[in-house]
Image (cartoon, helix red, strand yellow):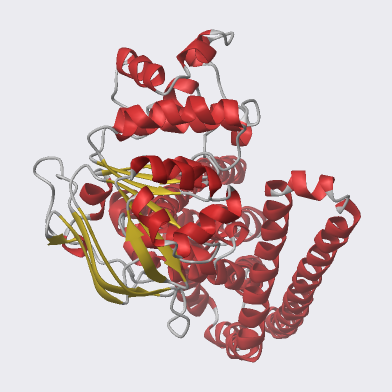
């Protein structure tokens, strides 16, 4: 859907109308500002009649007092209205920024992993935090500035025409030159603004990557290299900003010179009109004041053009993400009751790049409650295969069915509620232990959270913490060991109570003692659930009902543990590499 600034302004039409009304009053007061000076000069000092045929039967002293009081009143009212208008326009801008951030944040969460694989996290962060502010700049420095200047220019033009039409036309003669300057600098400034935004987002990306990988950087003593990488990104960003500022400054200088020429021409001709008696001194004062006020909004509009261009580039970057079409279209079906867990892969092929398939015509049928272990060398496509279940990706050909229905026909939220995942590395959030366990079911009671922790064999550890289940976990789980983090995610999966379970390398990075505790918790978690276990440690797949062996994106073998060993195929080769076959051969002989 095409996004526009207008669509974000529309919900706030009432405050917008009020702000426009304030701008009209402000413009009217701006028009009144010079008239007390005219009254003092022409009527009080020179004894001329009051403008517009007004009649006041008062002495010059009283008239002077009224004029001064009127001047103070105009400035007080003008100051109050400007304060109120600034608050109103800022609030409208902030509401629009918040709405744009909400939509952008939601869109980024909805987009598929294929999109995120192509994006830099730092760039997305910059678009959410910085680029979105551009919509406020466009509103305050663009829309409201132009409207304010337009109202003021219209009123001044009418009054100035009534005073001296020739001088008025001369004063307005600078406008074509100013618009010519915009035409001259438009493309260059837009390009420079977009380039500056991109380079600023690159700095965010470098910082994000460094902070995410700080352990590796320190372990390999790469601090100096990363510092140079950051400084280079910073230098490029500042150079892009400098180029934009230089264009803006050159443009502003051209605007100021044009305005100065127009002012000088009006003053020269206006003074001649005063000397010839065509204008009074008071009228010349009013005209000069209007001329200053006339040029001020023009200067503001044309000088903030560069700022508006940079803001427009930022908003365009935010809209670009909002206009990315969903590569995972929403289905219309929902699970009216928990899935039984029957899963079928039918001639499924998939690749992150179309020309490089990762999975090739996969056929696999899993019955409800079956434990399926997926093994094979690194890069065989194991994690990719199970990623198709929750529709992190859609197959390029073939179908994935759950309970006999194509998974693409289900709503994503309904589908993913049927699947619990224990991933590697385990992901925990910098919130309390309780909130981490209840992440998939935030409405769960404390008793349910504790019950899940008991099953995951982590309750005793939690009770030893200073604040128990209210203990806040460090960033990226830094205050927990790998085994503790893993058991925490197991408890999260238990609490979700989904009928389908995915375990991705559940014991890959723990010692044997911790592995035993984790496997005990996993055994309880897998009971009654259709389970997919991705494992490099073949010791974790002995109890699987079905072992699927993958190589090069294809299923090359499947069966139970002992049948595959007897077959002496790919699985037997993998097992022999890890443990040797002698012990198992003795067991097989006893079985025979």
* Residue occupying image coordinates x 21% and y 48%: 414
Q: Is residue 44 above or below residue 273?
A: above
* Residue occupying image coordinates x 48% and y 29%: 518
Position in image of residue 52 (x %, y %)? 43, 63
In the rendered image, the quadrant that contains the C terminus is top left
Q: Nearer the viewer, residue 259 or 458?
A: 458
Position in image of residue 556 (x %, y %)? 39, 69
Q: Is residue 365 above or below residue 273?
A: above
Task: Count how many numbered circles sit on residues in the image.
Answer: 0
Q: Is residue 443 above or below residue 56?
A: above
Q: Is residue 335 left or right of residue 270?
A: left
**Outermost residue toward the right in this view:** 224
Q: Nearer the viewer, residue 58 or 24?
A: 24
Place residue 266 in its image quadrant: bottom right
Q: Nearer the viewer, residue 131 or 525?
A: 525
In the rendered image, the quadrant that contains the N terminus is bottom left
Q: Nearer the viewer, residue 243 or 457?
A: 457
**Does residue 422 appear anywhere in the picture?**
no
Q: Is residue 80 left or right of residue 17?
A: right
Q: Is residue 340 left or right of residue 527?
A: left
Q: Is residue 102 left or right of residue 461?
A: left
**Does residue 433 appear anywhere in the picture?**
yes
Place residue 567 in its image quadrant: bottom left
Place residue 513 in its image quadrant: top right
* Residue occupying image coordinates x 46% and y 52%: 97
Position in image of residue 72 (x %, y %)? 59, 41
Position in image of residue 25 (x %, y %)? 42, 53
């Amino acid at each position: 859907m095409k996004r526009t600034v207008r669509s974000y302004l529309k919900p706030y039409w009432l405050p917008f109308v009020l702000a426009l009304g304030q701008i009209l009053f402000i413009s009217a007061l701006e028009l009144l500002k010079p008239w007390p000076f005219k009254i003092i000069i022409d009527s009080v000092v020179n004894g001329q009649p009051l403008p517009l045929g007004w009649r006041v039967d008062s002495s010059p002293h009283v008239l002077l007092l009224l004029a001064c009081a009127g001047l103070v009143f105009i400035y007080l009212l003008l100051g109050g209205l400007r304060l109120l208008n600034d608050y109103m326009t800022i609030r409208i801008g902030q509401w629009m920024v918040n709405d744009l951030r909400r939509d952008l944040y939601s869109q980024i969460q909805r987009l598929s992993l294929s999109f995120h694989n192509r994006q830099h996290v730092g760039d997305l962060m910059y678009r959410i935090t910085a680029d979105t502010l551009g919509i406020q700049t466009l509103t305050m420095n663009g829309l409201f500035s132009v409207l304010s200047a337009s109202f003021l220019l219209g009123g001044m033009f009418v009054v100035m025409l009534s005073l001296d039409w020739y001088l008025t036309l001369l004063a307005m003669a600078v406008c074509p030159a100013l618009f010519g300057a915009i035409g001259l600098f438009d493309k260059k400034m837009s390009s420079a603004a977009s380039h500056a935004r991109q380079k600023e987002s690159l700095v965010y990306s470098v910082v994000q990557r460094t902070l995410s990988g700080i352990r590796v950087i320190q372990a390999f003593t790469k601090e100096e290299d990363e510092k140079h990488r950051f400084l280079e990104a910073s230098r490029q960003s500042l150079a892009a900003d400098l180029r934009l500022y230089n264009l803006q400054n050159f443009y502003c200088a051209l605007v100021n010179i044009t305005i100065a020429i127009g002012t000088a021409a009006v003053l020269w001709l206006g003074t001649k009109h005063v000397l010839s008696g065509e204008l009074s001194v008071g009228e010349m004062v009013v005209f000069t004041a209007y001329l200053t006020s006339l040029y001020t909004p023009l200067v503001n509009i044309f000088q903030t053009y560069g700022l508006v261009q940079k803001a427009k580039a930022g908003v365009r970057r935010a809209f670009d993400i909002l206009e990315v079409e969903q590569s995972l279209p929403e289905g219309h079906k929902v699970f009216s009751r928990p899935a039984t867990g029957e899963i079928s892969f039918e001639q499924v092929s998939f690749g992150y790049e179309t020309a490089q398939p990762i999975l090739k015509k996969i056929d696999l049928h899993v019955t409800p409650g079956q434990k399926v272990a997926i093994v094979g060398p690194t890069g065989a496509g194991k994690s990719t295969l199970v990623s198709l279940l929750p529709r992190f990706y859609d197959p390029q050909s073939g179908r994935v069915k759950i309970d006999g229905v194509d998974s693409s026909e289900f709503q994503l939220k309904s589908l993913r509620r049927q699947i619990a995942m224990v991933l590697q590395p385990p992901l925990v959030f910098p919130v309390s232990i309780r909130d981490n366990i209840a992440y998939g079911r935030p409405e769960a009671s404390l008793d349910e959270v504790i019950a899940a922790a008991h099953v995951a064999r982590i309750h005793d550890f939690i009770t030893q913490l200073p604040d128990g289940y209210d203990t806040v976990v460090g960033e990226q789980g830094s205050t927990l060991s790998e085994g503790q983090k893993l058991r925490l995610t197991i408890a999260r999966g238990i609490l979700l109570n989904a009928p389908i379970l995915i375990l991705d390398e559940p014991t890959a990075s723990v010692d044997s003692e911790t592995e035993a505790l984790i496997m005990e918790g996993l055994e309880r978690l897998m009971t009654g659930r259709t389970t997919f276990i991705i494992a490099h440690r073949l010791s974790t797949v002995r109890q699987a009902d079905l072992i699927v062996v993958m190589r090069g994106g294809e299923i090359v073998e499947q069966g139970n543990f002992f049948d595959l060993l007897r077959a002496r195929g790919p699985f037997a080769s993998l097992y022999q590499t890890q443990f040797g076959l002698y012990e198992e051969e003795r067991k097989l002989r006893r079985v025979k």
